[in-house]
Amino acid sequence: MNTTHLSRRCALAALGATAFPRLRAQGARQRRPITWLVGQPAGGTTDVLTRLVARELALQLEQSMLIENRPGAAGAIALQATAKAAPDGLTLVTVSGPSLASIPRPQIARELTAVAILARGPMVLVGTMATALPPTLDGLLAAARENPGAFSYATSGTGSSQHLTGELLNQIARTRIVHVPYKGGSQAVTDVVGGQVPLGMLGITPVLPHIKAGKLRAYGVSTATRSPLLPEVPSLHEAGLSDFDADQWFVVAMPAGAPTDRVQALNAAINRALHAPEVQAGYTSAGVVLTPATAQQTTAFVARETQRWQTLAKNANLQLD
């Protein structure tokens, strides 16, 4: 990725709540801005991906895009604000998942309407080099089976995609590695690097520098295929955990009841934006892939994912408080 793309991406990540101007608005009629809510802090993966696509969307629609970060309650604050907004097609929210919670919150196909799939990407199982851990996945899992509860793994929070993927690991590998939730990924990464928690199931982007610096060992990525960011690291599936396949995803939604033609128009515009060179360059840097889908396909995808992870949580008796 060239330095122009890097500088633009960093500038986007650094902004808190930014209005993207209508850069080709000469002669265009005045329009109300689209407000796009993000339930995570500025600079995180969800925020950066949203801003990349929002910029292209503003250019296409010749309409201002106002990005508002409303972090808190594992994204529920932004979801609730979107569900309460007028269904006029002028409020969007990025829904990150899979994610489960004990307290009910707005859901797609209920209080929210799916618009498009923004991106999908893998997580990676890492171990600290600060303590003596087995150097191979087979050795790690064998040690975990011999010592139930002796190992633990950090994630960005209870009910997050990382937590659910870690419990999928326990289920398939027949281990009992203890979950240690954090209120965000940055502190989780710091504590795994420092050896306070031996393992982490985390997003690739924040751990990549530590892997390359030799501070973390990557045991495997969570998707069925390898990540271009870590081409030398096998997937957990190919490393011996048959049928292991899990990713984190980012979906665009709006309030339920929005006009169908508006949903379809925004879906088409977002899918076009995903193919813009700057968006693709940003996605490559973040280690995610674009997955264009219709609004109907997005709704069906979220329903399948929700059912899958609810079943796992029930079978594993997960505590989501």
Image: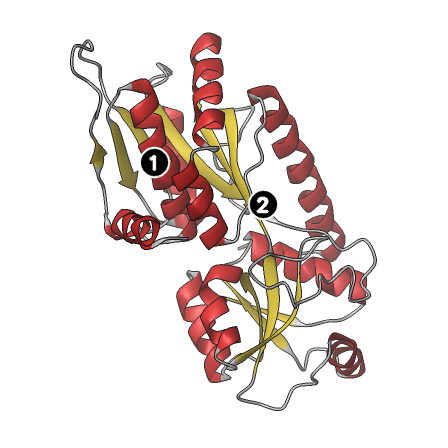
Image coloring type: secondary structure
Vertical comparison of 310 with 241: above or below: above
Q: Give the residue number, with chain letter if any, for mark 1.
A: 37
Res 59 quadrant in image: top left
Q: Position of residue 175 (x, y in %)?
A: 76, 71
Q: Position of residue 15 (x, y in %)?
A: 23, 48
Left or right: 202 as drawn, with respect to 83: right
Residue 294 visible in this rendered orientation of the protein: yes
Q: Give the residue number, with chain letter if any, for mark 2.
A: 98
- The amino acid type of the residue labelled 2 equals Pro
Distance (Cα) linking label 1 and label 2: 18 Å
- The amino acid type of the residue labelled 1 equals Leu
Vertical comparison of 16 with 150: above or below: above
Res 217 quadrant in image: bottom right
Left or right: 178 as drawn, with respect to 38: right
Residue at 33 percent across and 53 percent down: it is 6
Kind of element beneath mark 2: loop
Residue 99 visible in this rendered orientation of the protein: no
Residue at 51 percent across and 75 percent down: it is 212
Q: Earlier in the sequence, mark 1 or mark 2?
A: 1
Residue at 49 percent across and 14 percent down: it is 264
Instruction: Name the residue at the bottom extreme.
Output: 132
* Front one among 40 and 50: 50
Q: Categorize mark 1 by other alpha carbons within 10 Å: few (<14), some (14-19), many (20+).
A: many
Left or right: 131 as drawn, with respect to 282: right
Residue at 80 percent across and 62 percent down: it is 241
Kind of element beneath mark 1: strand
